[in-house]
Image (cartoon, rainbow, N blue to C red):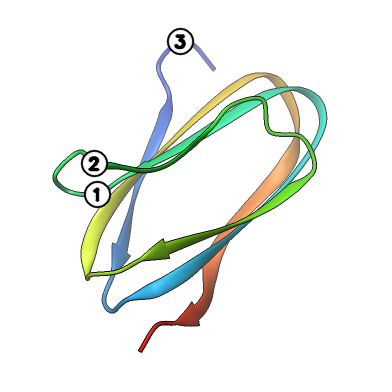
Amino acid sequence: MNAEPYRFELVIDAPVTLSLSCVTAEGRLRIQIKDSDEKILFDEKNIDMEDFEIPIDTPDTCTVSVWAEQYYGKFEIKPDSVSK
């Protein structure tokens, strides 16, 4: 990858808590999630082997940006629970 992050949209239909799991074997990983108003909901640098919970309070289309520098590993973002 180059200096530009890989970006993708995440459509949130209802309030939810996202589960983000990361396993870094080599390199560096940064993940940022912004709402449609560009408000940062999550921003973590140098992620190693960690799990995060990210509450999303309102339906929205979020943008996920991923920076990977000589990265070898995996990450997964999925809905963990629906907020009521």
Residue drawn where x is 38% and y is 36% of the image:
7
Q: Quick one: 56 or 24, which is closer to the camera?
A: 56
Residue drawn where x is 54% and y is 66% of the image:
78
Residue 51, x across and y down, in percent: 70, 54
Judged left or right of residue 35, residue 54 is right
Residue beneath disc 3? 3
Residue 20, x across and y down, in percent: 60, 55
Q: Quadrant of the C terminus?
A: bottom left
- How far, Cα to Cα, is label 2 from label 3? 22 Å
Q: Nearer the viewer, mark 1 or mark 3?
A: 1
> Which of the labelled discs sits on residue 39, or is there none?
2
> Which of the labelled discs sits on residue 35, or is there none?
1
Residue drawn where x is 28% and y is 79% of the image:
14
Q: Nearer the viewer, mark 2 or mark 3?
A: 2
Q: Quadrant of the N terminus?
A: top right
- How far, Cα to Cα, is label 2 from label 1? 5 Å
User: How many other residues sit within 10 Å of disc 1, few (<14), some (14-19) or many (≥20)?
Assistant: many
